[in-house]
Image: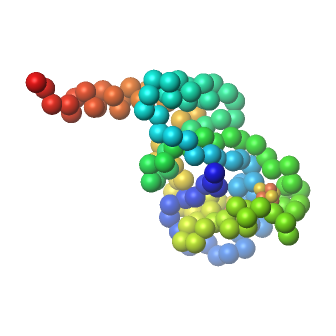
Amino acid sequence: MKFLHNIFKSKKDNGICAECKAVCCHHIALEIDKPTSKASKDHIRWYLLHEGVEVFIDHSGSWFLKFATKCSKLKGTMCGIYSSRPDICRNYPEKNQSCEYEGEGEYYKSIFKTEEEFTKYMDSKSSKKRKTSPHR
Ligand code: SF4
Ligand code: SF4
């Protein structure tokens, strides 16, 4: 499970949570296996048929399933359980990383918002693989 990290460190000052609309409290992202089998690819197609679901590949090549869902403890743009918030919130962003609002660049290398985008990506990967396979 993770919050989303942008790759580049921002030049902005701290205290930007006040100007942000609590972007990081509006979704969750769970790591999933890289799809290699027909069944796992079909699962991803199924995920993407649902509204509010996206799949992305981060900059280290890990795959994630992202759900757009607001935290029930968010009060306006403030955390309603600040003193007892989960560690994942407390530790975000991790050392040497930027949060998704302050960072520059994107948290993903590739993102799929529809099953068509995902299918196109997988097709392009397999046609590249066919072209680079040695002929006998
Ligand atoms: S940590 Fe970043 S994304 Fe989250 S509320 Fe603060 S500025 Fe916004
Ligand atoms: S517990 Fe607080 S900081 Fe964590 S996601 Fe919910 S509102 Fe945001």
Find residue 25 and report its horizontal and vertical position in percent: 75, 54
Residue 127 seen from this side: yes
The relative height of residue 12 versus residue 131 in the rendered view (above or below) is below
The relative height of residue 127 versus residue 100 in the rendered view (above or below) is above
Please tell me which residue is depicted at 28% across the width and 31% down the height of the picture.
128
The residue positioned farthest toward the bottom in the image shown? 13
Quarter of the image with the C terminus is: top left
Find residue 3 and report its horizontal and vertical position in percent: 64, 55
Horizontal relation, residue 48 to residue 123: left or right: right
The relative height of residue 32 versus residue 120 in the rendered view (above or below) is below
Q: Quadrant of ligand 1?
A: bottom right
Q: Nearer the viewer, residue 117 or 38?
A: 38
Please tell me which residue is depicted at 47% across the width and 34% down the height of the picture.
35
The relative height of residue 25 versus residue 38 in the rendered view (above or below) is below
Please tell me which residue is depicted at 51% across the width and 40% down the height of the picture.
33
Horizontal relation, residue 104 to residue 19: left or right: left
Q: Quadrant of residue 134?
A: top left
What's the coloring here?
rainbow
What is the number of callouts on the image?
A: 0
Find residue 104 and report its horizontal and vertical position in percent: 54, 61
Find residue 14 and report its horizontal and vertical position in percent: 68, 75
